[in-house]
Image (cartoon, coloured by chain):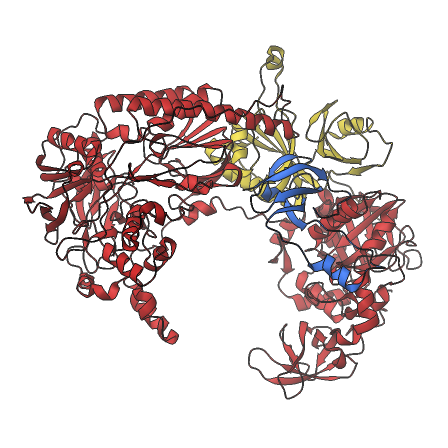
Amino acid sequence: MLLVPCPYCGPRNASDLRHVGESHVRPDPNTATPEEWRTYLYLRDNAADWTTETWYGTRCCRKYFKVERNTATNEFRNPPMPGNKLGGKA
Amino acid sequence: MPEHAAPAMVSPITTSYPSVAGSPLTLADESTLTKTLVRSDQAQFGLTFGHSRMEGDAIVAATRPDEWTILGAAEAVAAAEAAIDRGGFTSVIPWTHGRACFRLSGADASRMLEKVCGIDWSDHMTPDGAVVSASVALTTCDIIRNDIIRNDIAAGGAAGTPSYLLVMDRSFAQYLFDALIDAGQEFGIAVG
Amino acid sequence: MAQSNRLPQQPHEVIDRGSPLNFTWNGKNLTGFTGDTIASALVANGVEVVSRSMKYHRPRGYITADFWDPNGFVQVGPEPNVRSGHRELSSGIAVDPQNVWPSLDYDVKAANGLVGRFLSAGFYYKTFMKPASLWPAFEKVLSTFAPGGTVDLEAPKDEFDKRYAHPDVLVAGGGPAGMAAAIAAAESGASVMLVEHEHRLGGHLCWGSDADVALAGELAAAAEAAGVEVLVNSTVTGRYEDNWIAVTQRSHPLATERLIKARAKVLVVAAGLIERPYVFAGNDKPGVMLSGAVRRLVNLYAAKPGERAVVFSANADGDATVADLERAGIEVASVVDARSGANLIEAHGGSKRVSSIEFADGSKVDADLLVVAAGWTAPTSLLNMAGDRPVYDESSARFFPQHAIDNVLTTGGLAGDGTRDELVEHGRATGRLAAERAAAVRHRLQAFTVQAAPVDGDEPAWADDARTPLGRDPHPALFQSTSTGTKSKAFVDFSEDISNKDLVAAAKEGYDSVELLKRYTTATMGPAQGKLETVNTVAVLADARGETIEEVGTTVWRPPYAPISLGGLAGRIFNPHRVSAIHEWHTSNGMVPIQAGAWERPDHYGDPAAEVRNTRENVGIIDVSPLGKLDLRGPDVPKLLNLLYTNKWSKLPIEGVRYGIMCADDGVVMDDGVTGHLGENHYLMTTTSSGAARVWEWIENWLQTERPDWQVHVTPVTTAYTSINVAGPKSRELMAQLTDIDLDPEAFPYMTLRQGTIAGIDDCIMWRIGFTGELSYELHVPAGHGLHVWETLMETGADLGIKPFGLEAQRIMRLEKGHFIVGQDTDGLTLAPTTGLEPLIKLDKDDFVGKAELAWAMNDRLDELPRLVAIQTTDPTIVPMEATQIVRAGTTEILGRITSSRMSPTLNRSVCLGQVASAMAAPGTELELVLIPDGRRVTATVMEHHAHFDPEGERLRA
């Protein structure tokens, strides 16, 4: 099982966390076009490469945080940052 | 309106197990301890996430990065609450009824936890005072290592008896108590 | 038969002759000794044939006489598929052969051998492919041919268990190198778990020379002294991400099998080598054994495998077998040395046993035992799982790992060859390296784990691998893809009954990639999972393709290394369930429970319709503790509520209560509930019972990621309170006896809350809302006093006719009132305005979750969306099942479905909610329903109001 480097707890079993998915930015609902909004809702890059993704500490710190993970090798890079100000793709 | 007497609070643990004198591993129901939750953007009790200590006769534990739990007898908790820094954005939430609490003690306590929890319970990873939140038998618990140091041992500086407080949602308590008693059979677990 | 083939005492035997054990084989009473395996006891009793092969039902005897023996599967009492080469004998067990009919000695299906050409590779695929309709019939016949024992469903269940472990170093394999690695690692300060597949440490030393056995003993003692946790009769079955290691422990005193999930900082793979069978005609006849089998039987168990042996030897182990046989007094008729080019042609024999061996030079020797020492297979499984791709070395005739990843090290036979001392020295160096690297990993883990003890100094440097590599002994490459013998088959896969001819034929048919060949023929897919078969399979294919083994490559070994029982995977079964503080009362008062998520709660207490009537006439109470509750504190709670709910919250006064629906950003209804304003900067939100955890995470997500500047503390208090709904026209009268709170409708109106003392309990919250449509009070009392309040209500309300009601009565009453349930009446596509709650969607708010989609939907295409409406059948006695389809009259065009339906005890007719196409949603529209299960069509009508009962809400506002 993957060890996920939680920035609050330290390395934890992936089963203690929830993989939220690729990090993405929520557009302004008052100005977004339907196309932009639905891209935010439904479209993900799903790259076999480095991705920036969000995890949630369901069974540990109950914090959202962002990590960079290579989906092909499961390597992590860069110290993960706390979840606030998520946004911006890798 | 007629007067209604208020009885003492009731623990969620309603089954009884025989207690065995001198059992090497004990599980005690301490659900009726008073508990207070502190949520704050200020540092509290000088404790960072993952650590605990005694504040008077109460245990204070940093159970989340911005959350502290106080446990103990009512007076001890009240006394500890006096030490809360109420500056910044701080909430103090009564927590007695929301959480159940067990104490698992004995030389085999860490081996017992290994059966139900994926955390590394070795002394260097979870020393006395460590606080960790994790799944215990599929139930999310805050676990506070709070070794029982007898006076004579404390004087000699030797380690005490490993002891862990398991704090969990009240509604899961009976299930978890039964599950721990069952899983602890190989260590001769008894209700303490 | 008194152990006719038991040899005199052997110098290093492990049996206890003072401790005989009785057992039965095939119904006959036999005796063995403590320390015997079932196999060694059978051999000692002169048993020659132990099973029949899978397809051809050929008689089979032991070939490896260990865990991997393809022929050694037996039934032991109620337990099928026991590996008799591994399982230790115990007193009184009944051992029986499997896959025989009607008997082991006379097997009717052996006739399959005569029609063998029909059972060639791919036979099932080709023969039974068409017509598909006949497959059930084929299956019935074929299943009688399937191998395997009999499962006894009545047998008592075994105990299984699980545990986690976090060793610094985990060593897979307790031979000389593995033991040495474990000892050196432990002596370097690492915590070490040493896992040995066999029943004792030592590996091949156990059946070796005096010096071998002595060394095994010394190393085992040193491992214990060094504090190594030793698990024998246990197997490392898998290596996963970040050295997550699965270990199956079969030696636990209280559990048949225990699955250990270990997170090892460094894994040392010292799995040794597995002896490879040789492919030649008649190689499956009873009496053909590998050298390791013979040495184990003779040296460990003093069991005589034959009277007169021929030894075919390509290596030192073959030579050592000759010495062992001679010492044990078994005649060695001939030794054939493969290193000088001699070869076997065929093992001849009758139905029971080999009788003579034919050699390449044309000579023939009579013998009842043929010992084969033809080479070794490197079981690189764990290294494969770590990403290694082993490479074939022609000169040693086996695969070697290339390089494992940094925290997986290899030692022992997998790494190379050497003397006893060289293996131990390599093991020690590996153990030291493992400990050094583990220390670095440990330092890092400790430094980054918040609760860990502080760690001093810098992280130790990653130790270089400065080990002196083991050498590689030359070994003849003994592979044969074409049998040169007469009629007898030459088996590559004994478990699956696949011969070299089958493989060559499959390759000719085009299945000539090793992965395809494997799947098509099922070679290597039997119980040994390729341990015995893979390299021979690759060799046959290489020859068929005219390539080298290296060019063909090998299949990838995947977990598990050895089979894990389903019981072991399940382990101790944890089934968390939640109960309220009143659970015991419900249980002793006739509750019929229902499982709702993890909650166990009363569905009813015998008669839900009576519970409804009593609540509508008198007063009823229901335990609604599972209702999700979130304590919200902070100055920005109104902003949060405005963001999460579709309606407006800024002006909710203190003591006010409001209903809201939550959507996701796609506009689909996610949850609903009421939120009350308890005090300054303090609110209590309720959610659906099943949505409690999801809404909590949802709120944390918005607060942590999108609005981190907002000051809100959210705390789940679902079980901090026992929640009780007191409903019915007499509820005010009841509550007046239990609280000082002014209950006058003017003082405490609908949709407001009060806080105070109830039944002597302080800090209670009471709010006037109504899911049932009656005058009702929802009480939230501190959970430790919940039972007291409930019992006081029951006692005090006795004169008023109080009765508890369960979930079913509540569901009926809410349906009578037309309240929808999220997830029951809505689905994953239900946009909020289609539920009849358009007025609660405030598009003039600056932002709320779901706003964009809801604005587009409400402005542009509301007419295209299905609507939730109340429906009544024309015939009031018909209760259409939930999910009943609504169709265009006389057609099969689906226009909607019934989402909730019940017989209403209050109206004495059926009532429904349903989703229908917007064109059919106008009040009075006639609908046609297709009833389940008989397809009968009946009519129904769309109602004006969602509420079938008291649409004006006079009762609940009373």
Image mark count? 0
Q: Is residue C733 above or below residue C287?
A: below
For the C terminus of chain C, the image quarter is bottom right
For the N terminus of chain C, the image quarter is top left
Spot the residue most to the front. C546
Q: Is residue C427 above or below residue A65?
A: above
| Residue C729 or residue C894, whichever sits in front | C894
| Residue C282 or residue A60, whichever sits in front | C282
x, y percentage for residue C392? 34, 41
Spot the residue most to the bottom. C890
Name the side, left or right, on which B39 lies relative to C940.
Answer: right
Chain A display color: blue
Name the side, left or right, on which C449 lies relative to C223.
Answer: right
> Which residue: 76% across, 46% down?
C705
| Residue C762 or residue C264, whichever sits in front | C264
x, y percentage for residue C566? 42, 49
> Which residue: 90% across, 56% down?
C748
| Residue C584 or residue C641, whichever sits in front | C641
Q: Is residue C36 above or below residue C182?
A: below
x, y percentage for residue C861? 79, 73
Who's red, chain-wise? C
Q: Does residue C252 show up?
A: yes
Name the side, left or right, on which C562 lies relative to C673.
Answer: left
Chain B display color: yellow
Q: Does residue C237 show up?
A: no
x, y percentage for residue C643? 83, 54
